[in-house]
Amino acid sequence: MEKLIEQFSLGLFVWQLILFVGLVLLLKKFAWGPILNAVNEREEGIKDALEEAENARKEIQNLTADNERILKEARSERDAMLKEAREMKESIITDAKEEAKAQASKVVEQAQATIQAEKHAAIADLKNQVAELSVGIAEKVIRAELTNKDKQIKLVEEMLKEVTIS
Amino acid sequence: MHRINIVKLLSLLLLTVTFSVHAQDESQNDNHAENSHTVKDLKTEIKEYISHHLLDSHDFTLFSYTTVEGDHKYIGFPLPVILWDNGIKIFSSSKLHHGESVAELNGEYFSLYHNKIYKTDAEGTITFDNHQHPTNSKPLDFSLTKNVAFIILVGLFMLWMFNSMAKSYKKSTIPSGIGRFLEPIILYVRNDIAIPNIGEKHYKKYMSYLLTVFFFVWIINLLGLTPLGVNVTNNIAVTFALALITYLFTTFTANKNYWKHIFWMPGVPLPMKIILAPIELLGTFIKPFSLMIRLYANITAGHIVLMSIIGLMFIFKNWIGSPLSFGLAFALALLELLVAALQAYIFTMLSALYFGMAVEEHEHSEHH
Amino acid sequence: MTIPNIVGAGLIVIGAGLGIGRIGGSAMDAIARQPEASGKIQTAMLIAAALIEGIGFAALFAA
């Protein structure tokens, strides 16, 4: 300890104190200040850039989500449209079928009705002709028959019988 | 004989800084001279080399040697001597001739004895008291000694280096050149020393001091290991100045809580408060004191051991001892490289810790 | 240096060595237990070791 005190040099101490304080102040002004500021700025810059990148990433994520949503919507819309179209097609087909069926049945009915009418007409015509024929025949028969009185009466009787039957 | 000469030359190269005060030391050395007059005891010589190496000097000597005729030759350059003795007196240290002659200035005479300047008469007589302490009057010595010159050089070097680094940031935010090496260290000091110990809120005002002290101590420790051998941090005056700055910085930036914890420790009973106050107060002085002693002692001890091992080479002087001590010295030099950085780190770290204590806001007083 | 001084210095070195050794050992244990806290442990270890070392040196100079 004594040796230490003996070794102690006041001059060196004073010089060191002055020089060191001066060095701290000078370095603060010319070195540490600018260096630390630059480093801080850079770190802030990096932080900002990272934040920005994160934001951009989020935005992109949102965008893709949006896109996906839109795509999904479009797809479902298309599906709905297709379905509708299919339904429409089917309904059209069924409608057409039904209409065709109805038309066909109508035609058939008309045909049947016509046939019926023709038939009735034909029958009526036949009846008329038969009647005329029979009247003609009857006239001739009657003319031949009516020459004989007995036969006349007999005929009348027969005819009367027939009338009641028909 | 030839080999011994080489060894001697090597020794002089390695133990660069040498001083000779034999001229004035004759009276003391009389009893030594009796046992071995021709070859001075090698061990004492090495011891003197080491102790001189560790001391400051008034001139910058790169190396010295002794001619065959016994004259001491010094290669280096003188530094100004500044004395305060009823007015400033400035003269070149070359006038002192490494303690071999007396410097004369306006009719006053100064001479060097054991590295200290004394006022003497024209013949340079130094009188001693019973304890072999000189009784001559001692002027206040503010000389630009070797260490002061070195501090200035290191200061200029740091200014240049860090200023150029700061300028490189103006061009781009990415460091270039030496900055690539220094920036991680600066960031380490900030992120791992200052912020954890002082806290995010207050660390900024201490950064300049912490960075300066870290790099100053580190660089100057490293340069102390070079063959120039200028050890600045093994002067107690230097470490005392550094520790004093830490102490003053702590004291003047301390907040109310710090003083409260020293003089009136909260959360302990009254008698304990009275006992703790002086202990805590003493603690504030012990902390920077230990800083001072630690740096001084580590560097001094390192140099003494390293140089002693180098010195062993000249005691053994055989083929097995010299390589062995060379290897040991080499390993130790590597260790000293680590110690140089470690001591700078510890000094900075503990300074930061003390600053942190001074500005800490104690929210947890109840837990004490 | 007298004999008591040398003995005292030896005792100091033994004490400081034991202390620093204990700190180092405990720090190793702690790091092994919690490797993620190794940075903090190292810092605390260095501080504690430095304090002991400081006291040791102070005592050495007194001896």
Image (spheres, coloured by chain):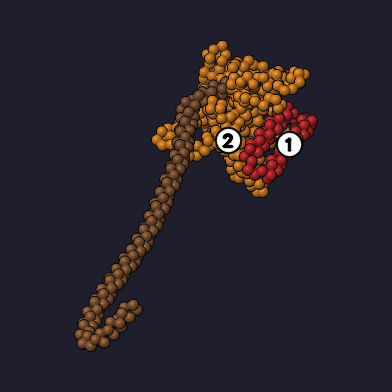
Chain colours: A brown, B orange, C red
**Residue at the image point whose x is 54% and y is 21% from the top:** A18
Query: Which residue is at 31% across, 78% downward?
Result: A163
- Residue hosting label 2: B192
Q: Nearer the viewer, residue C40 or A66?
A: A66
Amino acid type, residue under disc 2 in the picture: Asp
Residue B12: x %, y % from top left:
59, 37
Q: Position of residue B21 (x, y in %)?
A: 62, 27
Quadrant where the N terminus of chain B is found in the figure: top right
Q: Is mark 1 on a helix, strand or loop?
A: helix
Q: Is residue B84 left or right of residue A51?
A: right
- Asked if B6 appears above or below A80 in the picture, the reply is above
Q: Quarter of the image containing the C terminus of chain B?
A: top right
> What residue sits 22% from the left and 85% below the top?
A146
Amino acid under disc 1: Gly
In the picture, the disc for residue A68 is none
Q: Quadrant of residue B210?
A: top right
Mark 2 burial class by Cα count in 10 Å: few <14, some 14-19, many 20+ = some
Q: Evaluate whether residue A135 shows in this view.
A: yes
**Left or right: B49 with respect to A74?**
right
Residue C32 picture location, percent across and down: 68, 45
- Residue drawn at (43%, 48%), measured in percent from left and top? A69
Q: Visible in this render: residue B146?
A: no
The kind of secondary structure element at disc 2 is helix
Q: Nearer the viewer, residue B49 or B268?
A: B268
Percent across and percent down for residue B183 are: 50, 37
Q: Which mark is residue C19?
A: 1
